Image (cartoon, rainbow, N blue to C red):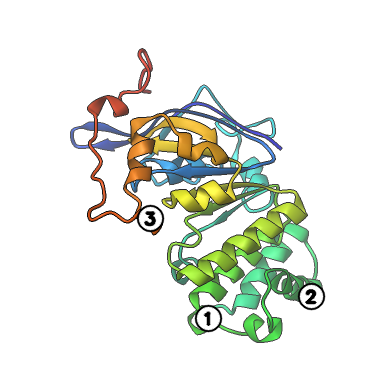
Amino acid sequence: MQVDIRNLSIAFPTATGLSHAVRNVSLTIGNEKLGIVGESGSGKSLTARSILRLLPRGARMTADKLSFDGIDILKADESAMRAIRGKRAGLILQDPKYSLNPVMTAGAQIAEAWRMHRKGGAREAHEGAMDLLAQVKINDPARVFGAYPHELSGGMGQRVMIAMMLAPDPELLIADEPTSALDATVQAEILRLLEDLVARRGMALILISHDLPLVSHFCDRVAVMYAGRIVEELGAGELAQAKHPYTRGLLECLPALSHPRPRLAVMKRDPAWAEGPPGAPLA
């Protein structure tokens, strides 16, 4: 499985013209763990969602190339996209309280995802859902199967979301801030779970996050986004040696117990960071 993105741009019409949210982004994603980091509004989620063509209404997307394992996403009809969405590529959203259906039990939602993509009967779907709950390290699958989302903790709800996305055995998993609503201990548990599942199933992973230390320890490669562009791309282990002033600024803003400072650094922004390389046009 390989995703190829070349000069992707996403814009939204406004009263004063087009507002460019993603600008000339190029990425190649193979069987690896790719982290996309940057501030809110930098275009991280839109870039990842473009692979599934799940963009807000009114979005105008253009690209020289946007393909999933050789399938042209720009030209694919809805039938072809449904064969990718959920089945070959799954999306984990950041807060299960707003992502799970409040009037369906957790087990029913996992079983529904299982049946939709595997075409089994009700008994097979029930067994598949129970197995998936066990795979995401839930100690009492039967209890969670019959529970409604409001009866689950944040960490448990996120495990249910992950189980739903694993039901069709995807080749790519997109995790959009999967731990932002969780406390530090549960965050670590969810990330260990994702790492284990990715390794055992041989999936590719795109992890969208604000947390630079987390990404540096968890991912293989990191793309840093600012104002809709990728300003730097490097190996996760090389993040401390980043060259771009924006990446350096993000790192220097972090508190460190080993080097306490009376005040954290404040990033000084340069308008040139948003301009990109010379001659890079906007779509």
Task: Tell me the crowding category of disc 1: few under 14, some 14 to 19, or many 20 or more residues within 10 angstroms, Cα based.
Answer: some
Give yes or no for contact between labels 3 and 2 (Cβ–Cβ under 8 Å). no
Q: Position of residue 116 (x, y in %)?
A: 70, 61
* Disc nearest the viewer among 3 and 1: 3
Classify residue 65 by image quadrant: top right
Q: Position of residue 21 (x, y in %)?
A: 34, 36
In this view, the residue in front, 280 or 149, is 280
Q: Secondary structure at mark 3?
A: loop
Against 217, residue 73 (above or below) is: above
Is residue 11 in view? no
Is residue 93 in view? yes
Residue type for callout 3:
Ala
Give yes or no for contact between labels 3 and 1 (Cβ–Cβ under 8 Å). no
Q: Residue at x 59, y 79 (%)?
A: 105
Mark closest to the chain's N terminus, 3 or 2: 2
Q: Which residue is mark 1?
A: 152
Against 17, residue 148 (above or below) is: below
Q: Position of residue 124 (x, y in %)?
A: 81, 72
Disc 3 to disc 1, how far (Cα)? 34 Å
Apparent side of residue 1 relative to residue 121 in the rendered image (left or right): left
Q: Residue at x 62, y 47 (%)?
A: 205
Apparent side of residue 73 relative to residue 255 in the rendered image (left or right): right
Q: Which residue is mark 2?
A: 127
Q: Which residue is mark 3?
A: 256
Pick the quarter of the image with the C terminus: top left
Mark closest to the chain's N terminus, 2 or 1: 2
Pick the quarter of the image with the N terminus: top right
Residue type for callout 1:
Leu
Apparent side of residue 227 relative to residue 90 in the rendered image (left or right): left
